[in-house]
Image (spheres, rainbow, N blue to C red):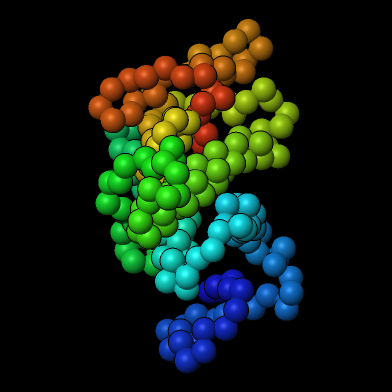
Amino acid sequence: MFVPVSGPFGQHVQCVSKRGYKLAFHSPRSPHFGGLWEASIKSIKTHLYRVLGESHLTYEELNTILIKIEAVLNSRPLTPLSSDPRDATPLTPAHFLIGEPTCSIPEPDLSSLPDNRLKIWLRVTRLTQYLWKRWNAEYLSQLQTRKKWLSNKGPNLSVGTLVLIKEDNIPPLSWSLGRVVRAQAGADGVVRVATVWSRGKEIKRSVRKLCPLPFEGNI
């Protein structure tokens, strides 16, 4: 079994080798070999530069923000955990790292408060919320503009597909998920409206507001 990695694990390499895994390292300075996960890292770096570029942070503040962003990236849904039409639980990167999804303590929206009214923790929280809003919107848009969708006017959803629902004012580490229960196609056969079962009720949304998971149906 080959496990692609982007750097050495030091003393852990020997332990992994004893378990029957063979590590395949990328060529140095070739992050494009990493595919989707390197693209995710690149996208969050872009927003880090834009949001934190002019901020004056201590080591502890920057470290806290990066840990929060790490939790955000590891919370993104990858593929359904089951084929149960009423189960909207996704598999996330956190399942591979800690065996369960990441979570966070509910916090108020601080985006409208000026810096001089915020203490250290609240300032860190606000910067994290800025990063989440920008990255989340871009990530959901990328899911709909993948090459396999470019030939249609949107993702041709089918019944049972687990989707991410675009919503406003979603807090960090929160994802609105649902299962497609009805898909309404036009005369050309392209689905433009779908009914989704989410949080115990049915809601109707345009396919522009619905994003299939990146690995839906692949594993």
Instruction: Tell me what residue is drawn at x 38 percent, y 51 percent.
Output: 118
In this rendering, is residue 44 above or below 144? Answer: below
In this rendering, is residue 6 above or below 135? Answer: below
Instruction: Tell me what residue is drawn at x 59 percent, y 29 percent.
Output: 155
Residue 86 quadrant? top left
Is residue 97 found left or right of 40 in the rendered image? left
Is residue 218 found left or right of 119 in the rendered image? right
In this rendering, is residue 87 above or below 32? Answer: above
Q: Position of residue 148 (x, y in %)?
A: 68, 37
Q: Is residue 49 visible?
A: yes
Instruction: Tell me what residue is drawn at x 37 percent, y 40 percent.
Output: 109
Q: Position of residue 102 (x, y in %)?
A: 34, 56
Is residue 157 found left or right of 88 in the rendered image? right
| Direction top: furthest residue | 187
Relative depth, front residue between 17 and 12: 12
Q: Position of residue 107 (x, y in %)?
A: 30, 46
Q: Position of residue 3 (x, y in %)?
A: 55, 73
Give the total of numbered labels: 0
Instruction: Tell me what residue is drawn at x 62 percent, y 26 percent.
Output: 154
